[in-house]
Amino acid sequence: MNSSVRGTPNRLVHETSPYLKQHAYNPVDWHPWGDVALAAARAQDRPIFLSIGYSACHWCHVMERESFENAAIAAAMNERFINIKVDREERPDLDQIYMTAVQLMTGRGGWPMSVFLTPDMQPFFGGTYWPPEPRMGMPGFHQVLLKVSEAWRDRQSDVRHSAHELTAAVRELAAGPPGRAELSDRLIQQSMQKLISIADRRYGGFGGAPKFPHAMDLRVLLRAWQRFGDEEALAVCRLTLDRMAQGGLYDQLGGGFHRYSTDERWLAPHFEKMLYDNALLTPVYLEAFQSTGDVEYARIARETLDYVLREMQRPNGGFYSTQDADSEGEEGKFFVWTEAEIDAVLDAGDAPAFKAAYDVTPRGNWEGRTILNRPRPWAELTSLLNLPPAELAAALTRCRAKLLDTRSARVHPGRDEKILTSWNGMMISALAQGAQVLNEPRYAVAAQAAADFLHGALCTGGARLQHAFKDGQARINGFLDDYACLIDGLVDLYQATFASRQLEWAVELAEVMCTLFSDDAGGGFFYTPSDHESLITRNKENHDGSTPSGNSMAATALLRLGRLCGRADFEIRAQATLEILAGVLVQSPTAGGQALLALDFFLGPTREMALIAGDSAAEVADVLRAIHRRFLPNKVIALRPPGAADAAISPVLQPLLQGRPTRGGAATLYICEHGRCGLPAAGVEQIARALG
């Protein structure tokens, strides 16, 4: 990454995005995306070179170092193109549109994304990383620049025609699949069968290297196991969770997950850490703990949340976006060890046990160094070392603490400290779930602080959200997933704190979302609001990828909020959105993990729980623990405080809580299923029996 000041800064020096600032002293005459750059392209009749990446992207740093810092290449760029640099995390709307174009042109995508556009923003040629000169079967970037420039000069009409055709194809894909499909559990079953068929039965995960976590798909498997009684679904999920947590994908010292594994056995990760990966993986481990009772899953969830609070939390609430893969110019340097480094830190009595447990050898397991991982089962390890389990566990805990303390003195990877509303919404949800399942109130406190920060810094009058915050500035109109993820996070936060203001804000956001984003003609939601800047198309995000699609999250959030607040209008919109997403699932059963989670909730049975507090606060706490230790994914729960009169209940909660008294002063639980209520259960024992 380029962080030193040299030469004259370009326009990016005035931006807040850390990724754009990394390029502020390139010799390239970079523009940020905006009217100035687009007007210059039109006035000079020059094609646009659009480069899209993000701060934690290793190959983005490589292309900057090799090409954008190269004086000859920069001169060619400046002479022949209007050059625009975009942070994909700030402008996911642009990233979606032009990634679709690159995938249509090349059959693959990724970052850095490099796209050539006509002055009216239509793409005509693109790719990802190019080396500065030809090598390994790839053309050199300098060569590409010259060829594209010559084509624009000599065959501009042909280029514009190709751009027009490609733009038409992008618009067709942006509109989403035509038609709707029936909502049935057959879609969940088909996805389960597909995931089982492509599962790696040795190392876990799906397919070969590189391997990504697939957090949403793992949650689908847990629901399929529960819905259909399919033990194979649970086995695939557990194997994957176990192997990921034992491998180098998981930070064995500091907690939290890296982006993905470069090999099939989860050993060698791409070392960047993303807020969203850890927000999405935490609920999987929490649900696996509820499903199986395996405390190892609870440990991983707790350590992951603790990592986020330690290293990714803003002082006054809110969570940063990413940590780089690189430090001191080397990928992974912060995280890997030599045997000599470990021997220098650990006591001589503890070191052999740690090295046996975490795969530390003189030769190392990655480029001469060691990525800490746990290849041996616990029983095998205790037998090998001839140590009692409790004694070994205590020794390893001591060793990890010492090594983490030593590691903290190293040069840390760079951190992208912008706050993104959508990713914060996901982390609020994860923390709130952690507070409930692990009985850890501090996670709810952190989630509440983040929500308060978003409300104060990224929410303007009328519940309009902004997308990003950095250096005291909130920027860019919120996108669909900003609203949907935050609404969903607020639903979970309410269920962790029972502060009704969370739901009141969620309802305001949902009403704004439905007004600004709904596609009343085609169904579902557009990704951008109705008053967004004019781009070559208005995208509808329907496929779940590394993060949930906006439409999948909108369906999820509206279903859960609708059930809690008795808002049938929210549920109707969610159902219509799911019918559109079902068309995607019919074509590709593994393209919609979050959509399937929403569908499972929609199909039910979904329990609407009204807990009426009695005379004993301890009894209420016992009831909540009884609820949270069970795997009950399709539930919502509201709490009526002790002695609260009907008139004192928030209007958003009156449909579920009003007119429901306690029985004999004991904590009383009313369980309903979409309009049909059973008899109330009073006291911990009765409630436990009612839960099953």
Image (cartoon, rainbow, N blue to C red):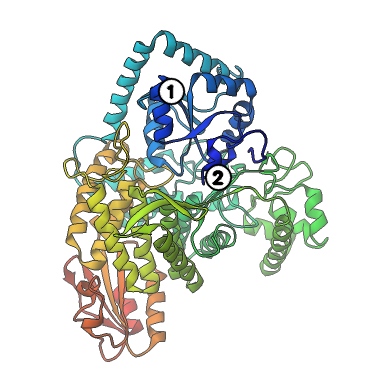
For the N terminus, give its image quadrant. Answer: top right
Against 326, residue 283 (above or below) is: below
Please tell me which residue lies in front, 160 or 188. Answer: 160
Where is residue 162? Give x, y as percent: 34, 17
First-in-chain label (2 vs 1): 2
The disc label shown at residue 106, or none? 1
Where is residue 356? Give x, y as percent: 73, 53
How packed mark 2 is, by other alpha carbons closer than 10 Å (few <14, some 14-19, many 20 or more), is: many
Please tell me which residue lies in front, 606 or 480. Answer: 480
How many numbered marks does the figure carry? 2
Q: Which residue is label 2 attached to?
A: 18
Where is residue 675? Give x, y as percent: 16, 67
The disc label shown at residue 434, or none? none
Task: Determine the image quadrant of residue 267.
Answer: top right
User: Residue, x 36% and y 69% (percent of image)?
Assistant: 494
Against 536, residue 218 (above or below) is: below
Horizontal side, residue 345 vs residue 556: left or right: right
**In the structure shown, which secondary structural element does the residue marked by tag 1 occupy?**
helix
User: Residue, x 29% and y 60% (percent of image)?
Assistant: 462
Tell me if residue 580 can be seen: yes
Where is residue 422? Give x, y as percent: 40, 52
Tell me if residue 124 can be seen: no
Against 593, residue 80 (above or below) is: above
How packed mark 1 is, by other alpha carbons closer than 10 Å (few <14, some 14-19, many 20 or more), is: few
Rounded to the nearest angstrom, the CA distance separating label 2 from label 1 is 29 Å
User: Residue, x 43% and y 60% (percent of image)?
Assistant: 457
